[in-house]
Image: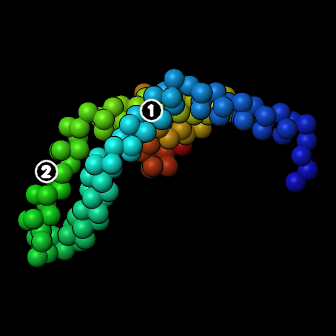
Amino acid sequence: MIMTYEWVGITDSADELSEMILQSEQAAKYREAYDSVYSDKLLAREIHDFARLKELYEEVQRFGKYHPDYKRVMKQIRVDKRRLDLNEKVAELRLAENELQDLMDQVSFILGRSVSEAVKIPSSNPFFSSDSSCGSGCGTGGGCSCSA
């Protein structure tokens, strides 16, 4: 593909936008919270152990209550998740993740709407997804009288 002046302008604008996002307050908070969590060796180990337990949980889910470790794994996953959820550093990381995701959703919404009102914009925020062409993402191909 031959690079035209328009494409150069678009890629320059995209680079500028990504730099602005990286320099945003939300991104800085996320990096700080991430560093706080993963610089704590004990907490990082707990997260790693939880990830391994999650893999075991998924295996247990395949077999259900007939798996020999079903009760132990089901109880342990809840206990460990609760302990991680109550950790202040993990809670701060989750809040920072959500704030950064909201920023990304807003940018996606603005970019999508600048292209067309009919563009479907994936979003973790129901405010942004409710303005998509069908409202609820029905997937019926217009069965709900949307404009899909």
Farthest residue to the top: give it. 25
Front one among 35 and 72? 35
Residue drawn at point x = 53 percent, y = 38 percent: 121
Which colour style is shown? rainbow
Q: Which mark is residue 65?
A: none
Disc 1 + disc 2, Cβ < 8 Å: no
Whether residue 130 is visible: no
Whether residue 43 is visible: yes
Residue 126 screen position, x and y as percent: 40, 32
Q: Is residue 66 above or below residue 98?
A: below
Residue drawn at point x = 56 percent, y = 25 percent: 24
Element type at mark 2:
helix
Q: Is residue 110 above or below residue 82?
A: above
Q: Which residue is mark 2?
A: 79
Instruction: Tell me the quarter of the image containing the N terminus.
Output: bottom right
Instruction: Tell me the quarter of the image containing the C terminus.
Output: top right
Q: Is 123 displayed left or right of 117 in the figure? A: left
Element type at mark 1:
helix
Number of on-image labels: 2
Residue drawn at point x = 72 percent, y = 35 percent: 15
Alpha-carbon neighbours of circle 2 within 10 Å: few (<14), some, or many (≥20)?
Answer: few
Residue 92 quadrant: top left
Q: Which residue is mark 1?
A: 32
Residue 123 screen position, x and y as percent: 47, 38
